[in-house]
Image (tube, rainbow, N blue to C red):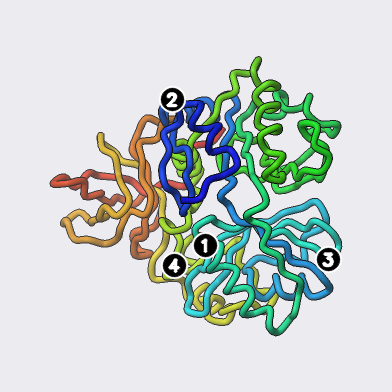
């Protein structure tokens, strides 16, 4: 198992450590509900340094990114980021990612830890045509997500820039925690505001320590990956490997908003055709009408108990106090208000299709 630069720090704090995407990662410290609540109402810090980072540069950087990603990266100006995905050639998704425009001809692609090699190979295959400069800097960089409604106030003393002016999906390269050049990015995956800090491995311990000093009066706490999962699920955000994968299309996954047919990209013609005809199945959000906890891979059934789909993500929502989940069903069952059932052991528990997100501030 790989370690992040902060593995020993997490162990010293008493974190429960697990293997995640080949890394030893903290899954919880005090417990998922307490940590979830901390981020929703205060401020918490995640170590997500296992994520991958690629730098794409040169005059052909944008043409390459336009070819391999579904969103329109030509809309990005320096200091802006966008959520996107890497479509494969057969209708599915290689990965979802965030694209940052760092300089005029330089972009940062942030990819999922479990897909670093796969993504690199996929992009490199298309780069034979474009010959853009590509660098995998994943192993040298760390990433902290400082999340929650108190994040701006708690962290303002650590930087000379006005954190309140960094809008969602914007970033600044600035001083932070006495480190000269870090990326301060408002691209968090929790729905409760805050920042992500990209810095070098040798800098992250100093950043971590100063973040906790600055946040002490605000009740700051370290947060594990278990709460990250419940937070993102309450927002209806997809998790790669659960809700999207090589067999799920961005159209059926509800990611049509990041799939722009104003340009040519990998498999764009087939995806445009799927969009115009409508997908056969859709990713839905649902809430249980009775007690129960839906889990990944549980069957979704109709009123007669016939299997119509499968749960891709599910949990007991700490904020809502009820079972919630995502799953794929035939389009006819996908309308908001539709009645479905989740097969939890021997019981078909009634559920209702709801509009995402489950949780709103």
CA–CA distance between discs 4 and 1? 16 Å
For residue 248, the mark is 4
Compare marks 2 and 3 and give the one earlier in the sequence: 2
Per the image, the residue denoted by label 2 is 30
Image coords of residue 194 (percent x, y): 66, 35
First of labels 2, 1 by sequence position: 2
Query: Which circle, 4 or 1, is nearer the viewer?
Result: 1
| Distance from Cα at disc 4 to Cα at disc 3 | 32 Å
Q: Residue furthest top?
A: 217
Label drawn at residue 115:
1
Q: Percent position (x, y) of residue 155?
A: 72, 27
Q: Which residue is mark 3?
A: 105
Q: Earlier in the sequence, mark 1 or mark 3?
A: 3
The image quadrant of residue 149 is top right
SS of the residue under disc 4: loop
Q: How far across and down, in percent of the image, does residue 62 sit?
A: 76, 70
Q: Is residue 21 above or below residue 67?
A: above
Which of the 4 quarters of the picture holds residue 350? top left
Question: What residue sits 41% from the left and 56% below the top?
Answer: 242
How far is the residue under mark 1 from the one under mark 3? 25 Å
Q: Are marks 2 and 1 in contact (CB under 8 Å)?
A: no
**Residue drawn at the location 48% of the way across and 49% of the way down:** 23
Tell me which residue sits at (21%, 46%) in the image: 344
């Amino acid at each position: 198992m790989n370690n992040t630069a902060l593995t020993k720090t997490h162990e010293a704090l008493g974190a429960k450590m697990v293997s995640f995407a080949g890394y030893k990662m903290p899954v919880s410290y005090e417990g998922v509900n307490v940590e979830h609540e901390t981020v929703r109402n205060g401020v918490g810090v995640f170590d997500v340094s296992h994520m991958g980072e690629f730098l794409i540069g040169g005059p052909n950087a944008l043409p390459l990114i336009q070819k391999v990603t579904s969103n329109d990266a030509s809309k990005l100006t320096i200091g802006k980021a966008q959520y996107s995905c890497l479509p494969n050639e057969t209708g599915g998704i290689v990965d979802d990612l965030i694209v940052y425009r760092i300089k005029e001809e330089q972009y940062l692609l942030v990819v999922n830890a479990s897909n670093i090699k796969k993504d690199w190979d996929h992009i490199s295959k298309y780069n034979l045509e474009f010959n853009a400069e590509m660098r995998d800097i994943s192993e040298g960089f760390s990433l902290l997500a400082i999340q929650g409604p108190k994040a701006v106030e708690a962290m303002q003393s650590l930087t000379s820039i006005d954190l309140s002016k960094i809008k969602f999906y914007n970033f600044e390269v600035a001083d932070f925690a006495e480190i000269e050049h870090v990326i301060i990015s408002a691209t968090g995956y929790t729905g409760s505001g805050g920042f992500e800090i990209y810095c070098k491995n040798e800098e992250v311990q100093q950043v971590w320590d100063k973040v906790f000093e600055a946040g002490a009066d605000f009740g700051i706490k370290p947060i594990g990956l278990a709460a990250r999962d419940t937070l993102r699920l309450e927002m209806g955000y997809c998790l790669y490997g659960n809700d999207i994968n090589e067999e799920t299309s961005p159209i059926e996954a509800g990611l049509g908003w990041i799939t722009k047919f104003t340009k040519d990209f990998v498999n764009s013609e087939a995806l445009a055709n799927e969009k115009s005809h409508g997908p056969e199945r859709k990713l839905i959000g649902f809430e249980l009408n009775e007690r129960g906890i839906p889990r990944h891979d549980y069957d979704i059934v109709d009123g007669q108990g016939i299997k119509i789909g499968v749960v891709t993500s599910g949990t007991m929502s700490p904020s809502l106090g009820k079972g919630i989940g995502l799953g794929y069903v035939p389009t006819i069952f996908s309308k908001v208000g539709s009645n479905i059932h989740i097969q939890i052991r021997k019981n078909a528990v009634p559920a209702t299709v709801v509009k995402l997100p489950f949780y709103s501030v």
